[in-house]
Image: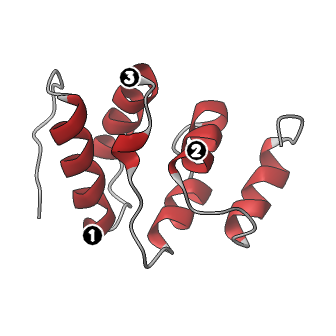
C-alpha cells in the first residue's frame, strides 16, 4: 500500500480492511501521523496487539509521544500502549505526565 494516498488509506482503516497489527499501525502512523482515522482504528479493536514487538526505536518514541498528546485514545488502548512501550523499550525521556488509568 505504499503508493496509496492518505484519503484511501484512511478509508481502508475506517472499514477495517487491514489486519490490526503493529506493522500496519506504524506504517500508517509513519506516513500520516496520529490521525483521527488511526485513533478510531485503534479504538475499534477488541483485541490488543504487541506494540513492543516493533523494533524501530524512533517510531516507537514518536508514537509514544503522539499517544500521550492525544486525548481521544480510549483508556484501555492508551494503557496497553504505554505499558508495553515503557516496559520493553524504556521510553522514559518524555516531558509529559504519564497517567495510566
Q: Are discs 1 and 2 less than 8 Å apart at CB?
A: no
Q: Quadrant of residue 75?
A: bottom left
The residue pinned by badge 2 equals 23
- Give the x, y percent position of residue 50: 38, 53
Q: CA distance from mark 1 to mark 3?
A: 23 Å
Q: Quadrant of residue 38?
A: bottom right
Q: CA distance from mark 2 to mark 3?
A: 14 Å
How packed mark 1 is, by other alpha carbons closer than 10 Å (few <14, some 14-19, many 20 or more), is: few
Front position in the image: 61 or 71: 61
Q: Residue furthest bottom?
A: 46
The residue pinned by badge 1 equals 76
How packed mark 2 is, by other alpha carbons closer than 10 Å (few <14, some 14-19, many 20 or more), is: few
Residue at 22% of width from left, 37% of height from top? 88
* Numbered label attached to residue 45: none
Is 48 situated above or below 46? above
Q: Are discs 2 and 3 less than 8 Å apart at CB?
A: no
The residue pinned by badge 3 equals 57
Q: Are discs 1 and 3 less than 8 Å apart at CB?
A: no
User: Circle 1 — which element?
Assistant: helix
97 left or right of 60 in image: left
Residue at 18% of width from left, 26% of height from top? 94
Q: CA distance from mark 1 to mark 2?
A: 20 Å
56 left or right of 30 in image: left
User: Circle 2 — which element?
Assistant: helix
Tag 3 or tag 1, which sits nearer the N-term?
A: 3
Which quarter of the rendered picture does the C terminus lie within? bottom left
Is 49 situated above or below 15? above
Which quarter of the rendered picture does the N terminus lie within? top right
Amino acid at each position: 500500500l505504499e503508493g496509496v494516498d492518505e484519503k484511501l488509506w484512511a478509508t481502508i482503516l475506517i472499514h477495517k480492511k487491514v489486519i490490526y497489527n503493529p506493522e500496519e499501525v506504524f506504517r500508517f502512523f509513519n506516513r500520516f501521523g496520529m490521525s483521527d482515522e488511526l485513533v478510531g482504528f485503534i479504538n475499534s479493536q477488541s483485541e490488543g496487539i504487541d506494540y513492543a514487538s516493533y523494533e524501530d526505536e524512533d517510531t516507537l518514541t514518536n508514537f509514544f509521544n503522539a499517544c500521550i498528546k492525544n486525548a481521544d485514545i480510549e483508556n484501555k488502548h492508551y494503557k496497553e500502549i504505554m505499558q508495553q512501550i515503557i516496559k520493553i523499550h524504556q521510553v522514559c525521556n518524555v516531558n509529559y505526565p504519564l497517567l495510566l488509568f
